[in-house]
Image (spheres, grey):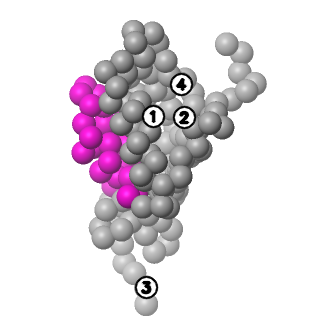
Amino acid sequence: MTVSIDREAEIAAVKEAIHTSITWCLPDKDREKLYRHTARDSSFFIFHPDSKSTIVGFDNFQKFAEELFFDPRFKAVSSEIKDLRVNLSPEGTVAWFSCLLDDQGEWDGKPVGWTDARWTGVLEKRDGTWFLVQQHFSLPTDREE
């Protein structure tokens, strides 16, 4: 049986989920937005640029987020997604993306963040909502600072 889907609408919904997942703290930290498109089970996974910050499972992500992002010393400053590319499975239930990310903040008044971080990920559509299940962030090692 062929499934008829509105591919443009699904890709727009995926893009909205991606944007919400990174801009949830601008202008104010909003827990509901942070977790809105996060798979709330053991399938959730993030590779960060450093090996110490790999996250497996929603519970570990929530602990990480609560300790870091909701600490009053953390303040989001700006987030910009560049060159976003989204692909959708033929059935319209899985999407994968890649982009460059500028994500800037402050920790205890000192600047922190990424410029031109490479961000890739996979989303699944579950009960009509797109959820991030896997993400990978990396920083180029051949860039001159």
Tag 1, which secondary structure? strand
Q: Amino acid at mark 1?
A: Ile
| Front one among 78 and 46 | 46
Q: Amino acid at mark 4?
A: Trp
* Residue 83 visible in the displayed image: yes
Disc on the earlier residue, 2 or 3: 3
Say which of marks 3 and 1 sits in front: 1
Say which of marks 1 and 4 sits in front: 4
Expressed as whole percent of the image width and height from the top left, the position of residue 52 reads 62, 36
Q: Are marks 1 and 2 in contact (CB under 8 Å)?
A: yes
- Was residue 20 drawn as part of the magenta stretch in this picture? yes
Residue 114 circle label: 4
Q: Amino acid at mark 3?
A: Thr
Disc on the earlier residue, 1 or 4: 1
Say which of marks 2 and 3 sits in front: 2
Residue occupied by mark 2: 100
Disc on the earlier residue, 2 or 4: 2
Tag 3, which secondary structure? loop
Q: Amino acid at mark 2?
A: Leu
| Front one among 42 and 14 | 42
Q: Please report the bounds of the magenta region as a residue range.
A: 13-40
Tag 2, which secondary structure? strand
**Which residue extends farthest top?**
109
Q: Are marks 1 and 4 in contact (CB under 8 Å)?
A: no
Q: Are marks 3 and 1 in contact (CB under 8 Å)?
A: no
In three-dimensional space, the C-alpha distance between marks 2 and 3, rounded to whole angstroms, equals 34 Å
Residue occupied by mark 1: 81
Q: Residue at x 54, y 34 (%)?
A: 100
Expressed as whole percent of the image width and height from the top left, the position of residue 54 reads 58, 43
Disc on the earlier residue, 3 or 4: 3
Expressed as whole percent of the image width and height from the top left, the position of residue 23 reads 34, 34
